[in-house]
Amino acid sequence: YGRTYEGRPLKLLAISAPENLERLEEIRQDVQRLADPAGLAAGDRDRILRRTPALVWLAYGVHGNESSSAEAAMGTAYVLAAGQGETADLLREVVVLVDPLSNPDGRERYVNGFKQRVGDTPNPRRAAAEHFEPWPGGRQNHYMLDLNRDWAWASQQETRHRIAAYRHWEPQVYVDFHEMGSESSYFFPPSAEPIHPRIDRRVLSWLDTFGRANAAAFDRQGWIYFKGENFDLFYPGYGDSYPSLRGAVGMTYEMAGGGRAGQAVILADGSTITLADRIARHLTTSLATVRTAARNGRRLLEDFAATRARAASGPARTYLWPADQQEARALADLLTLHGIRVRQLAEPVEVPARSVDSGTEESAAAPRRFPAGTWAVSTAQPLGNLVEALMELDSPMSESFVDRQRRRLEASLDAEFYDITAWSLPLAFNLRTWVASGEVGRGASPAAAVGGIRGDGGLGYLVPPQGIASYRLAAELQKRKIRHRVALAPLSAAGQAYPAGTLFIPRGGNSDDLRQVLDKLLQERSLTAQALSSSYEVGGVSLGSNQVAPVRPVRVGLVGGEGVDPTSFGFLWHLLDRQVGIDHDRLDLATLRQIDLSEIDVLVLPGGDYEDRLGEKGRETLDAWIKAGGSLVAIGEAVRWLQEHEMTSVKRWEPPKGDAGEGGPAEDEGDG
């Protein structure tokens, strides 16, 4: 169903009874009708439910260094495809979609590293080299980003392919197979708190059903496990929460192991856990899940359809964001990728609305006018639960859970959040967004994005900031050696205001076919530019002013390697390489002291541990380079390292102090 950044295939295997495989497309279309039940007559719905097997998606290996997962996929596929005994009967009631390796690039990196370190016989002692991964490890994908945090954002190629395949099938059960620390046992739902409040109660009720089935299978083998701890169902970027918000039963199964488990590892109690042990447990829950789904297929389909219908018929709320904002279309495109229906207002409307960043109090709503073209998305659609989860500022947690975290904090204990607790898409896209009760205005299909040069004139072209696409244009201008300048202050021309950051691309100094080349680049990026015939009428700063500075080529160095946080490095690498397309050099921290930094204009330090790896000489070299005019960009822990060595004037933020100064609240002065 797609390929990774390194060109490896992403595959999906459908396994079922022969009679189901013969009508697989009919089954898929029937499930799609249940997924969007508007206009589906009761009789048609019942006929679909009677003839349609449930769809079960088993996803393995989203983290490449959790090795038992992908191995168990092969065992599961073998047992199901053989169709012996009870399995043949089960497969009449379900279609099993096996995603055997969700992250092939990370898996390849992990396996190669392991093979390079392992001897003729695997060494189970933890100190052995085979239990340590070389940087950056195999957990993440090619760009070192965690695919099990990316469902909401779809920033990675693999995620976009997977969401398209998911929408193509819309399974009723989705299981994501993982590994955790080797001293743990095995986890399956019910999930821990917090649980996202927009996940339907029907979905949550199934967690106990599948949990009991897995428990019975483990009890027969004498294996221990746990439930209701650690692994929550809150952040919509996980491979269990995201399907749950689409109406499926989304679950995470976690086996002890992880990147340091290898083929065998000795545990603290002296026992040894092997790769075969780990595979056996994942194989057992895989088959127990298929068995449970097959025995409850009709009810799973009924609850799936009811969950989607309830979201579509519930009280509507409409999220609105004006189209003149820089990333307005980007948010609309992302929601559309998820299968969410997005529209643009066909005419201006005035409605009471509250700003999303004001919280959830309806009393904050005030009349507001929205122009035609404003983007709008309603919760009254089959994916309404997902809409609200992605768009709202706050996702409430139960009071009992919040109170427990407060008590733990007061007792100096760690909180029980798994990791991510905030993600509102409007805030992430820096978009002013409002929400109004009910359906708002008359909708129209989104207008196609248009770009190109407006107006006539041979002096040059002004390109105002239009989101990250403007940076992509600037990077391409650099690559093509097209001379351009950037406004450091606002200006106006042809009756339009242009903010700081506007690009000016003069005709002079560029090739004769500049207009044709630029127009094509603008159209490819859906950007607009204004042609100018004279600079005399330009208001604000003049185009020849020092405030409209020429953009010179720069050499960018991005530091990675042992000691640098892989995810911090990865998102920066993806930004430079894919999102913007800036020419840059990947540099290794271990060899940074050997590099002539005078050849680098901008050096980017991701989060990481620089103290021991750069040393005093490295710090002195870096400090001298900065003082000589080099530009340093530091992220996370790198900023703190610079502060500790007084290499930056940036100060840490400190909370405001009370009237009594540092040390506590002011004393009570009494009644006087």
Image (cartoon, rainbow, N blue to C red):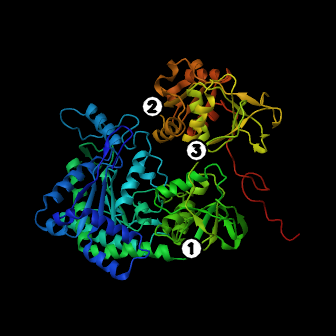
Q: Under tag 3, what secondary structure?
A: loop
Residue assigned mark 1: 316
Q: Earlier in the sequence, mark 2 or mark 1?
A: 1
Rendered image: mark on residue 526 = 3
Question: In this picture, is 196 found above or below 331?
Answer: below
Amino acid type, label 2 = Gly
Please name which of the two marks, 2 or 3, marks the residue nearer to the observer: 3
Most distant residue in the front direction: 456
Quarter of the image containing the C terminus?
bottom right
Q: Under tag 1, what secondary structure?
A: loop
Instruction: Say which of 672 and 369 sits in front.
Output: 369
Is residue 442 at least partly visible in the picture?
Answer: yes
Please name which of the two marks, 2 or 1, marks the residue nearer to the observer: 1
Q: CA distance from mark 2 to mark 1?
A: 50 Å
Amino acid type, label 3 = Ser
Residue assigned mark 2: 561
Q: CA distance from mark 2 to mark 3?
A: 36 Å
Amino acid type, label 1 = Ala
- The number of discs equals 3
Q: Is residue 669 left or right of residue 623?
A: right
Q: Under tag 2, what secondary structure?
A: loop
Most distant residue in the left direction: 85
Question: In this picture, is 651 found above or below 274?
Answer: above
Rendered image: mark on residue 193 = none
Residue for point 60% across, 51% down: 429
The picture quadrant where one finds residue 463 is: top right
Instruction: Say which of 501 and 622 sits in front.
Output: 501
Q: Position of residue 527 (x, y in %)?
A: 61, 43
Q: Earlier in the sequence, mark 2 or mark 3?
A: 3
Residue for point 24% across, 67% down: 94
Q: Is residue 647 left or right of residue 583?
A: right
